[in-house]
Amino acid sequence: MREQGLGHPLVVEHLRKTFADRAARVKAIDDVSFEVRDGELYTLLGPSGCGKTSTLRAVAGLEHPDGGRISIAGAVVSDGDGGRFVAPNKRDTGMVFQSYGIWPHMTVFDNAAFPLQVGKVKLSKAQMRERVERALAIVRLAGYEDRMATQLSGGQQQRLALARALIRQPKLLLLDEPLSNLDAKLREAMRAEVATLQQEIGVTTLYVTHDQDEALSMSSRIAVMSEGRIIQEGTPREIYERPATRFVADFVGTTNFLDASVSRGGNGAVTLTTEVGELTVGESTGSWKVGDVVVAAVRPESLRVHLAPAPEAANVLDAQVDRVMFVGDSLDCHLRVGSRSWVTRQDPRLPMEQGQRVWVEVPGDGLSLIRGGSEAGADAA
Amino acid sequence: MTTDTQHSQPVPATTGDGEISAPPPVGAPDPLPSGRLAGWGAGAGPLAAVITIPAVLIVGLLVVVVYLSFKTGGLPGGTFTTSNYGDFFGDSQVWEVARNTLVYVAVTLATALLFGTTLAVLVERTDFGWEKTINATMVLRILIPGFFTAMGWIFLFHPRIGAINTWLMDLFGLSKAPIDIVSLGGMGFVEGLGLSAVVFIMASSSLRAMDGSLEEASRASGASALMTLRRVTLPLMVPSLIGASLFTATIAVSSLDIPLIMGLGDRVFVFSTYLYVATHPASGVTDYGVPAAFSTFMVVIALGFSWLYTRVLRSTRKYQVVTGKGYRPVTMRLGRWRWAAWLFVGGYFLWSTILPVLMVAWMSLQPFVRVPSADALKTVSLDNFRNLDWDYVLRGVATTVKLMLLAPTIAVAFSLAFSLVVVRSRLRVRFLYDIVAFLPQAVPQLIFAFSAFIAALYWSPGSFDLYGTLALLVIVMAMMQLAFGTRMFNAGLLQIHAELEEAAAMSGASAWATFRRVTLPLLRPVVTYSWLWLALLSFRDLTVPTILGSQDTLTLSAVSWTLYNSGQVGGSSAVTILMVAAMLPAVLLFLFVTRKRSVGAGGGAL
């Protein structure tokens, strides 16, 4: 089935890796398979310890997998335990580390030129100079060649690391939480910059992050990981709007949940019965039978709060205001909906007070259904 | 004594101030296995094979001692026996040596801890000032040969020839010298004065690493400065002071110079002088059996203490106080007690260093031992220098120079290999190498030297006679220095973020290219520092050269001791003064090279 995918820049099949943690064996990577298409920025997203970095490091060759196969640009670089294993320096990849890994004892030029200097193909001085200057220009570091690397700011070091990773024109670029060491403002700027650069160069990229904003804004596709496994794979929009599990819904963005059971099923439109009233779901993936126990998930920004009953609107639930927090550009409202606590952001001018009764409108197309009872859904099943 | 030792070494391994490391990762990285497969991971196997040679040598020397303790006469050819232990435990004279050693070490520790800790607190936690000067002087103090201080103190306080004693007797008309330095207490005190510099460096680096906010919290809770010192600062220092005590005690047991010069004449023996006499018997009768049993006993004690210490460390790890931020809490103001602090610091340097140096210088100018006086000034001359057996001295210079160049070079190369395996490889046995490299610090080096002495004497392979050669001296010295070197490189490597090496591998660099282009350049400051420090220690050491040296391989320090031992006090003083003079440029170079880094790390591998 994956045979036709072998031409992809990266194919990972049934990757496994366990670590010894004192007496126990921890499954860091538990049967992970995915492929990254040409020119894509593919993100592994998940909380710390989910196995995303281990997966990336296995692709880089910095970790020895226990099982599974990794192919880069059609060439198998890692095959099972004890099988073929290509050393990291022999793989056609470039990598940016979390700490950048900029060598403090070298100049900016030497840092960027290093991959060319240690490479098989010997370049003339002039050729090397030209390649380095071009790479530095791409990351807007032209003119910094003779500075010591330590004289660069965090953001500049980050860009230098990117230039170094790209200078060999690798088939695959690996980015390991490259923005996590930057302060918040710089991080947002770099997010756009890295994404733009990646698109311009068109280099296929495997990106690892625990930051959902980064993942959503930069990726072509995202794989959400938890406990060594890929829980859901899809475009940022799919992941955000149609989380397949409770875990994904919870991890990516803020989500309000409500226990429900299906009272009218079928494909597409579904009607739910909840403890605070009926809900109609405009469109849902999968087919649902009457009596199915589900969890309805809705994003805070989809909700509309009415201060008076709104009979003309559909899907209106009774709620009580638990707490209102003014945060400048909006109001953060904590609502009690049945036995659940929901959050929502509303217009800052909305006059709301603690304890007040309100009516929450849940747009049918903003609802997604997750199979299982209230505590279920954390598993991929 | 596990892989933890790299963090728990008694001697601080402060290498630079993080300038060679990449910015530490923040955020929440995935947990990684402790030993990372670095860029040159492929080289770990061959490296481990190479360092197995010194590792076997170090362990082998200890095994030999234990083996010989079960042989009649302590000779390799002897038959198996346990009588050595019977003799050891039954011989009242040997027990007296054991008791003497205990008293001597106790006095040493008390002196070293008192002066070292007080000075460290003064420098690090009060507004006394002079931080740089005191730190540099203390490093210098470590490098002053022990026999130098011992001679100086003899000239000051010997009951018969000591200047102070003579003056006091003249002044008060006493019939008996008021102070007897040629005693166990005296020996311990003088040894402790020297080792207080080691305690100082360890204590002050522990104070520097301490999270200052803990003390400020105490002040903010209403505690006075003194109360804070007593209730917070000192208790937090306890683990590192225990480490310093263990380290200092091991050096004191091993040290030969002070007990030789201050005790041999009056036949006050401690463990080190006991072994010296056993290897340099006045009569031709040799019995290494009981000394070997005694040494085995000391090895067991030393290893036991090290094991206990690592246990203590592990339990105190719970209260991690080290931030590495170098954040210093508000300092205590001395106010009207400043004069007392000055008296303490001034008195310490005056008595521990300045006066002994002046006395040795004085004696080097006198034809015979004379108390300084106007009368004696007339007999001042350079005759001692002129009449020196220069041929003999120059041979000492040649041996010393060779030793100073060769031993640190070998030690640094092997230490680097040890650390690469211990810190960076994923070999399952890497912790074993860590333990082995730690042994020359945990066990008195004297015992290694003693073992090497017998081994070389009786196990020379074929015509290749190691006994009394420079090669033997260099090898044993280098093995002893492994402990210090490995500690330095462990700390240095831990400061180099593994991603710096991984980045090289990801750039296409081979294992060798990664090491040559990234790891080694980043470690260069540690290489320079360790090499210079070890070279200076090779210069001052008397223990290993005295046990292992022959007439052909006398080092300068051994020359000085030989002259002293044969009654040529003036000549011996002259050689000692020349040694210190020769050492000065090297020390200045060391201070210059290391000026940017904290003066920590000293002490090691004395």
Image (cartoon, coloured by chain):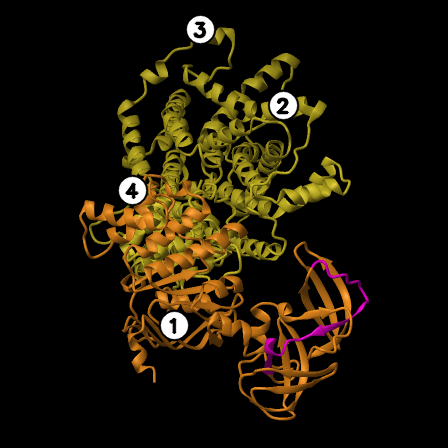
Chain B: give its colour.
yellow
Three-letter amino acid code at the position of disc 2: Trp
Which residue is rendered at x = 53% and y = 84% of the image? Answer: A285
**SS assignment at label 2:** helix
Secondary element under disc 3, as helix, strand or loop, is loop
Q: Amino acid at mark 4?
A: Gly
Disc 3/disc 1 C-alpha distance (Å)? 84 Å
**Measured along the vertical axis of the image, is residue B382 above or below residue A226?**
above
Question: Which of pointers 4 and 1 indicates the residue nearer the eye?
Answer: 1
Tell me the residue that label 4 is attached to: B468
Which residues fall within the magenta stretch? A348-370
Query: Which of the chains bears the disc numbered 4?
Result: B
Q: Which residue is mark 3?
A: B378
Label 1 resides on the chain identified as A
User: Which dot, 2 or 3, sits closer to the camera?
Assistant: 2
Q: Which residue is mark 1?
A: A65
Q: Which residue is mark 2?
A: B342
Q: Quadrant of residue B343?
A: top right
Q: Is residue A159 visible?
A: yes
* Amino acid of disc 3: Lys
Residue B183 image label: none
Distance Cα–Cα, label 2 vs label 1: 64 Å
x then y, percent, for residue B495: 45, 49
